[in-house]
Image (tube, grey):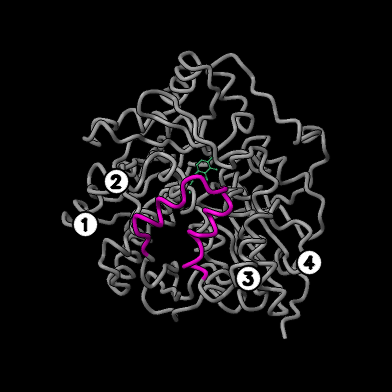
Amino acid sequence: MRYVSTRGTAPALGFEDVLLTGLARDGGLYVPESWPSFGPEEIRALAGLTYAEAAVRVMRPFVGEALDEADLRAIVEAAYAGFAHAAVAPLKQLDARVWLMELFHGPTLAFKDFALQVVGRLFDHVLKKRGQRVTIVGATSGDTGSAAIEACRGRKRIEIFILYPEGRVSEVQRRQMTTVTDKNVHNIAVQGTFDDCQDLVKAMFNDTAFRDEISMSAVNSINWARVMVQVAYYFVAGAALGAPDRKIAFSVPSGNFGNVFAGYGAMKMGLPVAKLIVGTNRNDILTRYFETGVMTMAEVHPTHSPSMDIQVSSNFERLLFELYGRDGAALAAAMSSFRETGKLDPGKARWDAARADFDAARFDDAGTLAEVARLYRETGELIDPHSAIGVAAARAKLDGIGDTRVPVVALGTAHPAKFPDATEKATGVRPDLPARLGDLMTRKERMSVLSNDLAQVQDFVRRHAPATENA
Ligand SMILES: *Cc1c(COP(=O)(O)O)cnc(C)c1O
């Protein structure tokens, strides 16, 4: 399997290089040269397998020759062995048509563990084979950082720097990052928003000399391998609920568009997906695009679902690449004009194509808490504000799916204990932190506060990244 950049000029790469490279050198994102295809028999055969085995089958074509199947299986089994639920991604029926897929039983209580527990191990495997080390620099709105740190802590070949917006992540999220004591972990609290953090990381990537100097790499959702790993649970849920003989819809609380893009990938690979419903909070550039056909940048507002407080969803470029007929040059021009003007109008034909596959709904904080409260009242389920946006969007867009036989799987992206204040505000019940997180709330924290300034952040990374010894 080869991978090409969405902006058309960076060289095509194999899986190992795509894993280690993150952002393409032309500023684009890597996508598979073509989507592998799963026939009805292959999809049917996924039902009843262990989660890890199904995931190996889904990932296999993307990895190609880079890893042999036994190594891939060992990595995937180790990644999910630490999850606290035997089903790894259990499905719970909430009402006649809406299901919740709980993706929060990993070590940091958010769905990002699914990808990062695998990706950390993939990095280790490939770096060891090549005798290399890397400096991972990532931006987080909260959950990526803790999941990435958990996946990379103590790994000898990896130095990891995580930028998060100071004061804009929940206390549990912050502590999951700042209480890690491994020497290869560096937390940077940036005085700015998540988009500022993401821009800093992008700017460091685009500084090719700096990037080479520190052997920079990324585990943000721009990293293709994360999307690839996430494709698996769409297949697993689909097969469990009757695919390929029944269509399935998914409702995904979205920020950077990485999770729902994995659902789009599953659809491209042959899973019969009736609709992908995008749920957003008031930071709703995605919902506005699906409603109006035009993308316009706006300010970021803090909400009860901070992991979705994003305006420029980096993975949306992967969908645009498909909508632009995989024309990298045309997309590169569109993206640079978007950066300059804050506005992108891809045109009616592309909007129609997007709406054939996607629908979208937005919920403000009041709507989010109302859904947390409703679900608790009607079913006894305590859910977090992100997951609530997924469930609320599923319910709001049921009619748009048409066929009433189609179930909607809402993705439960975080454990309620990760956002206890919002959940308590909605229900009066404070969710308990699972015992395995132990003394998180009392451990000593460690972070560096830096201003939203590229030179200052680069200098910090340079001073703390050990000399790279790549030969
Ligand atoms: C990251 C995150 C999201 C958004 O996922 P994207 O892949 O960025 O769209 C939603 N909910 C939670 C809890 C998250 O951590």
Determine contact: label 1, label 2, CB under 8 Å.
Answer: no
The residue shown at (36%, 76%) is 8
Check residue 216 in the rendering and tell me which mark sits there, or answer none.
Answer: 3
Tell me if residue 368 comes above or below residue 178 in the rendering: above
| Crowd rating for badge 1 (residues with CA inside 10 Å; few <14, some 14–19, many 20+) | some
Element under disc 2: strand
> Would you say residue 314 sits in the magenta stretch?
no
Determine contact: label 1, label 4, CB under 8 Å.
Answer: no
Label 1 and label 4: CA atoms lie apart by 46 Å
Element under disc 1: helix
Q: Is mark 1 within 8 Å of ligand 1?
A: no
Tell me if residue 24 comes above or below residue 431 in the rendering: below
The residue that mark 4 highlights is 156
Quarter of the image with the N terminus is bottom left
The residue shown at (59%, 40%) is 87
- Residue type beneath disc 3: Met
Element under disc 3: strand
The residue that mark 1 highlights is 350
The disc, 4 or 3, on the residue closer to the chain's N-terminal end is 4
Magenta span: 37-63
Check residue 140 in the rendering and tell me which mark sits there, or answer none.
Answer: none
